[in-house]
Image: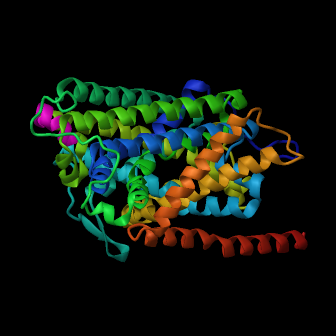
């Protein structure tokens, strides 16, 4: 590079529709088609089960609204990482980036790519074979399911390396398809089911908002049971913050990002609740609780249309997981780009391709580690460890919003009491959920492991800073 040549930078090209599509498209993966049975087994009543989805939906919208305030003030690449850095300093921001790279982002990519492969197997059973074709190093079996997942990760990384514009176009297309798919599921379930109208003798819907007396769940206590049951819906609704990662590539970002967050998150929350209403209109609570492999959407469609219905839902989930994978992959790489710009990652992560204006090294780095997790099969266990940790980072970020808004030297202030009430309500709700997750025997171990893994980034940060200081002193 010549002395006068400037390094390439990210380019602002995305509008409101593309930004909202990244919010909604990143949120809707395979979770909504699988997590409801987990909630039903914990809660044991129809009313409270739907109430859990309302509760987590409200939390999600509150979170998206608050992040809109932060994104309007700091419309930069990196999103939540930048918010944490500005509010609390580099150490919390680095710890977030640390666990984001090793588990949250790449674990999500691995899980969603494998889910995509499995539903390809539903449509084309001869293509997906769970038997090992050969054994890789470390005694890891290579199956056609893993091969297809890896191919999918590589193909989307190649596509997104041509620039954010192309990735956004693909995201817009698949988000539109998956919303139509969810609407189809809702319309069919509400129109053809009979439980809500009392037309089915096989199902008696219990609309109570309390746990049944004498049930197993009541032994753990109401709030503890609700907190554990909320893990699945929270996981299914996660990734609403991903659009903030591409803040440096959104046109008129201070205005567009808040709107995109609220619009995208609200749309998904409403769709999720209506999908669950469709489930209970067709299936009894017992059927939902005992569905094989938690495939409640497939059971609903099969109950209505037989084998054809199962194939239809497989297509919907394929579209959903592919679009989700693209949104996660597109946005997540910008976190590593931003960390490198701050000197907290190798400089290569912060490079932008001069022609495509895309952080291609970051894209490929996350792809390589996601492939490693896919091949090892450890992503599911890892993701269970960070549900609690992700919630804690959301709480810390919301507290950072209040800290910055209330600071005497703040260059932005929230205008009315409601602006303060939204993050406060989120913090209170999330603190209650996280406290019971930490205290519940079912989630205590995974929560503590997640915190422990996050803290392993602390000595890495200190070592990195020491190396940087030595390098600076040597110049």
- Is residue 452 left or right of 126 when viewed as pictured? right
Q: Position of residue 416 (x, y in %)?
A: 74, 33
Question: Quick one: 288 or 199, which is closer to the camera?
Answer: 199
Who's the residue at 18% across and 42% down the image? 284
Question: Quick one: 29 or 165, which is closer to the camera?
Answer: 29
Q: Position of residue 276 (x, y in %)?
A: 31, 38
Question: Quick one: 392 or 213, which is closer to the camera?
Answer: 213
In the image, residue 464 sits, relative to residue 257, either above or below, namely below
**Residue 233 lies in the magenta stretch:** no
The secondary structure that most of the magenta stretch takes on is: helix
Who's the residue at 87% across and 68% down the image? 472
- Is residue 150 left or right of 287 when viewed as pictured? right
Whether residue 405 can be seen here = yes
- Is residue 361 left or right of 130 when viewed as pictured? right
Q: Which residues are magenta?
A: 298-307
Q: Position of residue 121 (x, y in %)?
A: 22, 47
Whether residue 391 can be seen here = no
Outermost residue, front side: 213
| Picture quadrant where residue 200 is located | top left
In the image, residue 252 sits, relative to residue 300, either above or below, namely above
- Identify the image quadrant of the C terminus: bottom right
Question: Quick one: 414 or 341, which is closer to the camera?
Answer: 414
Who's the residue at 21% across and 47% down the image? 288
In the image, residue 233 sits, relative to residue 455, either above or below, namely above
- Is residue 240 left or right of 455 when viewed as pictured? left
Q: How is the image coloured?
A: rainbow
**Residue 300 lies in the magenta stretch:** yes
How many tags in the picture? 0
């Amino acid at each position: 590079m010549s002395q006068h040549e400037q390094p390439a930078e990210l380019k602002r090209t995305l509008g409101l529709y593309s930004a909202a599509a990244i919010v909604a498209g990143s949120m809707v993966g395979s979770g909504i088609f699988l997590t409801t049975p987990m909630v039903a087994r914990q809660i044991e009543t129809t009313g409270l089960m739907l109430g859990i989805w309302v509760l987590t939906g409200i939390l999600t919208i509150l979170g998206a609204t608050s992040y809109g305030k932060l994104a309007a003030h700091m419309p930069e690449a990196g999103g939540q990482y930048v918010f944490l850095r500005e509010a609390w300093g580099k150490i919390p921001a680095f710890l977030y980036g640390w666990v984001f790279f090793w588990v949250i982002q790449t674990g999500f990519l691995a899980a969603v790519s494998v889910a995509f492969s499995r539903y390809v197997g539903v449509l084309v059973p001869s293509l997906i074979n769970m038997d090992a074709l050969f054994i890789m190093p470390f005694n890891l079996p290579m199956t056609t399911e893993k091969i297809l997942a890896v191919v999918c990760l590589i193909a989307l990384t190649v596509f997104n390396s041509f620039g954010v514009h192309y990735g956004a176009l693909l995201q817009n297309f698949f988000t539109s398809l998956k919303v139509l798919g969810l609407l189809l599921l809702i319309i069919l379930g509400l129109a053809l089911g009979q439980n809500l109208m009392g037309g089915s003798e096989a199902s008696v819907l219990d609309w109570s908002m309390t746990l049944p007396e004498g049930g197993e769940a009541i032994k753990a206590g109401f709030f503890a049971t609700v907190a554990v049951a909320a893990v699945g819906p929270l996981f299914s609704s996660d990734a609403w913050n991903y659009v903030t990662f591409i803040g440096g590539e959104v046109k008129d970002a201070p205005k567009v990002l808040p709107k995109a967050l609220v619009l995208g998150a609200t749309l998904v929350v409403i769709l999720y609740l209506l999908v669950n209403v469709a489930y209970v209109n067709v299936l009894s609570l017992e059927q939902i609780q005992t569905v094989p492999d938690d495939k409640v959407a497939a059971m609903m469609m099969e109950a209505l249309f037989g084998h054809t219905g199962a194939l239809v839902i497989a297509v919907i989930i394929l579209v959903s997981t592919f679009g989700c994978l693209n949104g996660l992959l597109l946005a997540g790489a910008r976190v590593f780009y931003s960390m490198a710009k701050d000197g907290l990652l190798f400089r290569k992560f912060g490079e932008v391709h001069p022609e495509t204006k895309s952080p291609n090294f970051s894209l490929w780095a996350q792809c390589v580690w996601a492939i490693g997790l896919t091949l090892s099969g450890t992503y599911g266990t890892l993701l269970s460890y960070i549900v609690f940790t992700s919630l804690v980072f959301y709480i810390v970020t919301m507290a950072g919003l209040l800290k910055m808004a209330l600071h005497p030297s703040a260059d932005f202030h929230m205008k009315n009491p409601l602006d303060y009430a939204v993050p406060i309500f989120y913090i209170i709700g999330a603190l209650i959920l996280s406290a019971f997750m930490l205290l519940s025997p079912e989630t205590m171990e995974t929560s503590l492991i997640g915190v422990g893994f996050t803290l392993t980034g602390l000595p890495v940060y200190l070592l990195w800073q020491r190396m940087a200081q030595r390098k600076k002193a040597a110049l």
